Each structure stands twice: as C-alpha cells, then as structure tokens.
C-alpha cells in the first residue's frame, strides 16, 4: 500500500523537510544533541479506517491518521486536516512543526496532527458529520484534554470541532469541552480564535518590517491562499494601511495595482463565488502572480509552494509564512542569499495555537475572557516570541527559522532530558 508509505519517492516529502530543519539546528544544541534523535521519530502514529454510509446508501472507506510527534512538554496539540491529498508523510511533518511551534511560543503543549484523505467539497454535510464522528471514535484512544487536543485545519472548521467534541463526550459519558479547540462559542469556544492565525501572521510580519525599516502603512502585499488565514492576514494589513496588490486561491489569481478591496473580496468568496471572478481586480495567470513585486509576501495555502525556482525570482522583501512548511529548505538558502527575510511558520502562524491555548484554559476554568483581552494577550505573546527569535538570530548570525528551532528544540529536549527514560 504505497499510500501509507512516508518514504514514497513519487510524492512530495514534507517529513524530509522537517528532518533537514532538525539537522540544521543540531550543531546549536550543545549537550542536548544527545536527545536530538527523539525529534526525528514521532512518538505515536495511528492509522485508521473510516467507513461511512454515503447518502446514496453505498459504503465508502477513507483513510485517517493521528500522529503525536512529541509530548515531553505537555499534551499533544494540532489540527485535523480534510483534504484529498492528505498523506501520512504530511501529517508527520505537520505534527513535528507543531512541536516546534508550541515550544517556540512557550506553550505547555507537544506537537500532534491528524487528517483524513477526503475531498470535503465533494461531500454533503451529513457525510462530513459521519466521517468526523467515525474518525473521532477511531482516534478516541489517543485524544483527550490532558492527552491530545485536536483543532481545525485545512478543510475543517468549528462545526467539525463541535461534532468531535460531542462524539468524544458521548463516548466518555459526560461533556468534555476541552477535548478540542476551535469550537463554536456556544460550546466553550474562544472569542478571537477564528481570526487568530491570520492576525498572528500580520503581527509577526509587522515586527519583522519594523526591524528592517519597512512600514506596513503604504506597503505592497501579496497573499497566496485566501482561506481563513490568508483572508484575515490580508484584512489586517489593509486595516493598517497596506495595499493588497494580488491574491491567489485554488480558483486562480487576481491583481490590482491600485489595491484590492479585501473586505469586498472576502464577501464575494463568502457568497459562494470564485475569487478569480472578483470584479474589483483583474485575473492574472498563476505564474504572473508570483512575479508581482511586493514588500510583504504571505504564503497561506499548503506546504512546499516556494521551491528553488520560485525562491530565485520572487520579488519581495519579507515572507511571512501563514501556511505550514511552504518554503523548502533549499529555497530558504536562496532567499537568505538574496537578502529576503523569511518569518518562519513556527512563529508566524502560531496565533491559532496560542488562542487555542487560551480556549483550553478557559474551558478548564469555565471562566471566559472578552475579545479585547484575547487580542491583547495574543499580541503580547506573539511580539515577545518574535523578538526573542530575532535577537537570537542576530546574536548567532543565523536565519529566523534556525533561531526559532534553536529556542524550541532546546526547550523540548531540556524537558526530555529532565524527564529521563522510563523504563
């Protein structure tokens, strides 16, 4: 079954990118290098069959995964992805990046990730509910509010989390609101959670710009991916006075040298229309999109989109990674040589898991904060984390990604060292 292999040479290998990033940080770990192999081996991998009855009465079987990469610092934390191209290799890499992300932000979590190989756009709401409930039941042996806490990701949303919470709670015999985050507000969700990832991308990009004398006001911005993360990031930039010149999603690419009305574009897509048909901009080819000059470029779709060829020519000054793993390691080197700053995913898109942490804490205490408090706490944590990474990068003469990995891996492996091995 080649689909199960995370060494399949015919498919992109995000796990290989993660391993390369670990290898690059290893020389900076000192005596903790003794434990570095633990980061190259996920703690647990669960592969499950997800059978459901389709609306037409036929039986369909889908493949699902839950990977716990590392739980040395706390329970696993990571989203659940519904996408037709989900692979175990991808889920492993995403779980590893979650380990680094949570540690870089100093959140008391380890890294985990889940996924089901389905096309959610080709399924009815009832079929999606049946997939979600069956998948939740299958991975129920791993998840729990002190063990592993799923959240939304590509192809999933707060409704998915409501079904997961309900299924887990029924199987436990009582309501367990803290088993997932990203839930509806009515079920213990947190204000500000939906906007948190995109807002965090904006905050870290803004901070990177400040260190280089690039002001957001009047800046030129391109956003690749116009889902929740890309749309909110674009909206934050626009509200701060930037000009959004180009947008891209699965339907195609659009551009307007005078600036795109992001709010109108969001409303256009929300009404069920394609972004490429938005009347406030001109369609451009996907290749032309990558050639549009910008001050800030936000890749906010899937991993591996910035390869060596694109890194050689992308005309921007700062890349803030809204997606997980959008830049290949070899492309990182090219961008660095060209003087382009990359704000890595493990910092840039950590706003979502940060507010997920707030949600988890609020669920435990049954005491909820208002949105102003959420956003203020998010700002404080994101700014402090970015500045620590930037200062270490300057001190060690390394990239922001390497600095973030140094901080994160040091925290994870120090915890592993203190806990020791049992038995």
Image: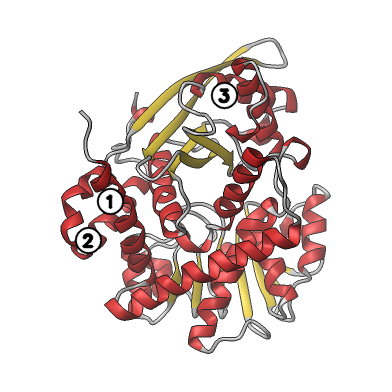
Asked if residue 21 lies left or right of residue 117, the reply is left
Q: Which mark is residue 279?
A: none
**Mark 3 vs 1: CB contact within 8 A:** no
The answer to which quarter of the image holds residue 10 is top left
Mark closer to the chain start, 2 or 1: 2
**Label disc, if present, on residue 136 of the rendered structure:** 3
Label 2: which residue? 29
Q: Quadrant of the C terminus?
A: top left
* Mark 2 and mark 1 residues within 8 Å of each other at the beta carbon: yes
Query: Residue 191, percent across and down?
Result: 73, 51
The residue closer to the viewer here, 374 or 63, is 374
Mark 2 residue crowding within 10 angstroms, few (<14) / some (14–19) / many (20+): some
According to the image, label 1 marks what residue?
413
Element at label 3:
helix
Mark closer to the observer (3, 2): 2
Q: Nearer the viewer, mark 3 or mark 1?
A: 1
Query: With respect to residue 350, does 422 lie above or below?
Result: above
How far is disc 2 from disc 1 in space, using C-alphas?
9 Å
Q: Is residue 168 above or below residue 315?
A: above
Residue at image coords 20%, 55%:
32
Numbered disc total? 3
Q: Position of residue 228 (x, y in %)?
A: 67, 53
Which type of secondary structure does the marked residue at label 1 adopt? helix
């Amino acid at each position: 079954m080649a689909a199960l292999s995370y060494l399949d040479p015919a498919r992109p290998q995000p796990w290989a990118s993660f391993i390369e990033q670990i290898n690059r940080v290893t020389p900076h770990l000192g005596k903790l290098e003794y434990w570095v192999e633990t980061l190259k081996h996920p703690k647990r991998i669960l592969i499950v069959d997800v059978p459901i009855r389709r609306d037409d009465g036929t039986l369909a079987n889908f493949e699902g995964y839950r990977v716990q990469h590392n739980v040395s610092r706390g329970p696993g934390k990571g989203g659940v992805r519904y996408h037709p191209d989900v692979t175990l290799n991808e889920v492993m890499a995403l779980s590893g990046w979650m380990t680094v992300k949570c540690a870089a932000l100093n959140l008391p979590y380890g890294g985990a990730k889940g996924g089901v190989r389905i096309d959610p756009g080709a399924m009815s709401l009832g079929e999606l509910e049946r997939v979600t409930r069956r998948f939740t039941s299958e991975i129920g042996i791993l998840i729990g509010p002190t063990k592993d806490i799923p959240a939304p990701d590509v192809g999933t949303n707060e409704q998915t989390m409501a079904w997961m919470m309900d299924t887990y709670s029924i199987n436990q015999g009582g309501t367990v609101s803290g088993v997932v985050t990203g839930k509806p507000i009515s079920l213990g969700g947190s204000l500000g959670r939906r906007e948190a990832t995109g807002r965090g991308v904006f905050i870290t990009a803004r901070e990177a710009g400040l260190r280089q004398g690039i002001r957001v006001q009047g800046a030129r911005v391109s956003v690749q991916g116009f889902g929740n993360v890309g749309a909110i990031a674009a909206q934050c930039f626009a509200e701060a006075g930037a000009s959004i010149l180009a947008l891209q999603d699965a339907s195609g690419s659009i551009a307007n040298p005078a600036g795109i009305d992001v709010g109108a574009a969001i409303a256009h897509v929300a009404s069920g229309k394609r972004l490429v048909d938005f009347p406030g901009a001109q369609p451009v080819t996907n290749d032309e999109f990558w050639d549009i000059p910008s001050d800030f470029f936000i890749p906010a779709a899937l991993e591996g989109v910035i390869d060596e060829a694109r890194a050689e020519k992308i005309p921007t000054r700062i890349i803030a990674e809204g997606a997980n793993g959008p830049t290949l390691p070899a492309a990182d080197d090219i961008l660095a040589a060209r003087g382009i700053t990359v704000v890595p995913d493990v910092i840039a898109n950590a706003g979502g898991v940060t507010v997920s942490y707030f949600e988890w804490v609020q669920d435990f205490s049954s005491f909820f904060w208002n949105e102003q408090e959420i956003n203020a706490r998010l700002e404080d944590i994101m700014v402090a984390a970015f500045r620590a990474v930037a200062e270490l990068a300057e001190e060690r003469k390394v990239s922001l990604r390497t600095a973030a990995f140094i901080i994160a891996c040091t925290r994870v492996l120090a915890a592993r060292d203190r806990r020791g091995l049992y038995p």
